[in-house]
Image (cartoon, grey):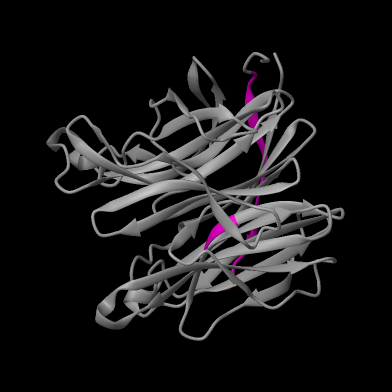
Amino acid sequence: MSATGPAQEIALTKIHDDGTYNAFTDLAKFQGQYYCTFRSAISHGGAGHDVLGEIVVIRSSDTKEWSEVARFASVGVDLRDPKLLVTPTDIRVYAVDCRLRPKGTIQYANCAWSSTDGTTWSESQPMAPGYIFWRPKMNNGKFYVPAYVRRPGYCGVDVLVSDDGYDWHVQSTPIPPATVNGETLWANETEILFLENGKALLFARRNYTGTPNPELAKYGGFRLGIVLQSDANTLTQWEVLDESLYFHCPAAIEHNGRIFLAGRDKLEMDDGRVTETGRLWEFVAGKGFTEIQHLKTHGDSSYMGVVAEGDVLLVSYYSTHEGETAYFEKPGKADIYLSRVRIVEE
């Protein structure tokens, strides 16, 4: 593992601003073009608040000028958390399908669209009812995705496997609910990262359920995340590597032998309040996390995608620091940004 070097944000560009609430990004490079996807709606809220989101895909040849190449919508459905996957034959957009059921409950499923040229896209392919996908990845010709399932009294993470990226089954259940410091913690947003050394890592967000620890009450939904490791060929036996960092919406990448994680952290304000902000860390097993960049975000924000090129990490994210926080059904404005962070070896 290389020693941690300094990092510097060398450019920050707003790549989408249409006056609406745009959020939950991902980023990929396919056939020499850059793709960014995100959800477009009137607010952060979802089907339970009568807010329905669409999925937008924009493309650029130089990361400066972007144009819309796809927009996906489904009647009566809130589409959320889009993720990009580049395969040997196509580029895919996966999204969570949320719809309101009788008595106010939400039905979760997933769907995907594919394209061989980034311009013409397939019809929606439904899959994995009951699960909420995070970011699908490929390893040795198979597809894998950490997915969490919610049911009364339970929220945990399964790792699903597929031969084609559409028909999924359970490989393992690495993160069931756990009790930490007297609180029951539920895992949800979980990133899988396949390493060059044949190992796989999971980076999982955890939230409390029930009455919070009074000493942590001011942190709201923020609780320490968890990092686990397994053999990438089996993904059945998992060991805990780290429980030291507060993070949401993990996006991880291995580049030049180093592991980087982008995510949302808590930001403690001078007046004692806690808000949300985006950060970029380097992770070293046994040593934990080192922050290398604090991204220009504030409040309702983050949900990054990461692409590595040479000594630069490109990080997409959303933020309301130039708009207005738009939780639940309250309309507001959020924009999409692209940060270029140079990583320098020592």
Q: Nearer the viewer, residue 204 or 157?
A: 157
Where is residue 20 drawn, in percent x and y? 51, 73
The quadrant of the image that shows the N terminus is top right
Q: Nearer the viewer, residue 75 or 315?
A: 75
Q: Is residue 250 visible?
A: no
**Of all residues shown, which one is farthest toward the bottom?**
75
Q: Within the magenta stretch, is there residue 53?
A: no
- The residue sitting at 77% across, 53% down in the picture is 87
For residue 3, above or below residue 266: above
State whether the magenta stretch is mostly helix, strand or loop: strand
For residue 131, above or below residue 252: below
For residue 95, above or below residue 251: below
Q: Is residue 101 left or right of residue 121?
A: left
Where is residue 219 drawn, in percent x and y? 26, 41
Q: Is residue 243 visible?
A: yes
Q: Nearer the viewer, residue 169 or 335?
A: 169
- The residue sitting at 46% across, 84% down in the picture is 76
Residue stretch in magenta? 5-25
- The residue sitting at 68% across, 15% down in the picture is 2
Q: Is residue 149 left or right of residue 294?
A: left
Image quadrant assignment for residue 66: bottom right
- The residue sitting at 53% across, 52% down in the picture is 134
The quadrant of the image that shows the C terminus is top right
For residue 61, above or below residue 287: below
Where is residue 74 drawn, in percent x and y? 55, 82
Q: Within the magenta stretch, is there residue 16?
A: yes
Where is residue 96 drawn, in percent x and y? 51, 65
Please count the marks in the image. 0
